[in-house]
Amino acid sequence: QVQLVQSGAEVKKPGASVKVSCKASGYTFTSYDINWVRQATGQGLEWMGWMNPNSGNTGYAQKFQGRVTMTRNTSISTAYMELSSLRSEDTAVYYCARAGGSYAIDAFDIWGQGTMVTVSS
Amino acid sequence: SYELTQPPSVSVSPGQTARITCSGDALPKKYAYWYQQKSGQAPVLVIYEDSKRPSGIPERFSGSSSGTMATLTISGAQVEDEADYYCYSTDSSGNHGVFGGGTKLTVL
């Protein structure tokens, strides 16, 4: 079935970087954008950016410009989100989501299970 | 930066109609999308392009948009509809997405 499976939980120290993976299966990986969304505990959803797996083109939320990099490896149908210069406020669950699949170009129809990233000294 | 504004909470009794609003300056030109998130789970798309319902979403969920406000309506809300609901849209350029702050729906 169509799914996105993310990598496991991470614990990082302030100032470090984290790289979360998102493996797609059940569909053609290069056909639909991947977006990244995060959610701090007890808080709302926050859009981080998008990547076109076919071209590699990306677009990032202004808040994360300079700190986030979204890449992909098409040979293994996997998208990556790397966040650098981590601080405690980056502690959150990070989700990948497919856009433009079954419905509309900006509709996130398939979500990964989420990856908990904890930033703590 | 662009913002979408939702009420923090809405409360209804079972069987009543729940309405959740989302306001944003670009909504006259950009579609609204609605996501339901239950505790500990990933979000689920319940409405796309203002008013369209994905397969598998109950008919009691509907959406509309007029001017700078989009509305999610749950007609005959059920206890199982208790969740956080988020609207989503893009800014006027279409290149940057944004979620509303979320609305906690209580059905009791």
Image (cartoon, coloured by chain):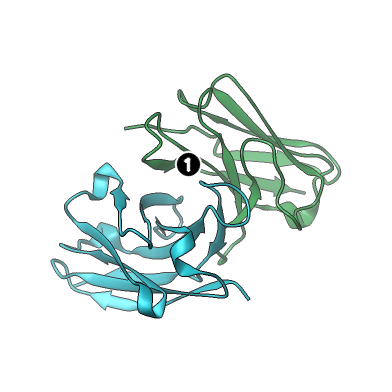
- Residue A7 visible in the displayed image: no
Residue B18 or residue B107, whichever sits in front: B18
Seen at 28% across and 77% down, the residue is A11
Quadrant containing the N terminus of chain B in the rendered view: top left
Residue B50 placed where, x, y %?
A: 63, 35
Residue B79 placed where, x, y %?
A: 78, 54
- Residue B35 visible in the displayed image: yes
Is residue B72 toward the left or the right of residue B4 in the image?
A: right
Q: Chain of mark 1?
A: B
Seen at 58% across and 25% down, the residue is B69
Seen at 18% across and 73% down, the residue is A13
Is residue A58 toward the left or the right of residue A16 in the image?
A: right
Going by the numbered disc 1, the residue's amino acid type is Gly
Q: Residue furthest top?
A: B67
Residue A109 placed where, x, y %?
A: 58, 57
Is residue B70 toward the left or the right of residue A32 in the image?
A: right
Which chain is displayed in green in the rendered image? B
Label 1 crowd (10 A; few <14 / some 14-19 / many >=20): many
Q: Secondary structure at mark 1?
A: loop
Residue A5 or residue B20, whichever sits in front: A5
- In the picture of the structure, the residue carrying the numbered disc 1 is B101
Q: Colour of chain A?
A: cyan
Residue A69 or residue A104, whichever sits in front: A104
Q: Quadrant of residue A14?
A: bottom left
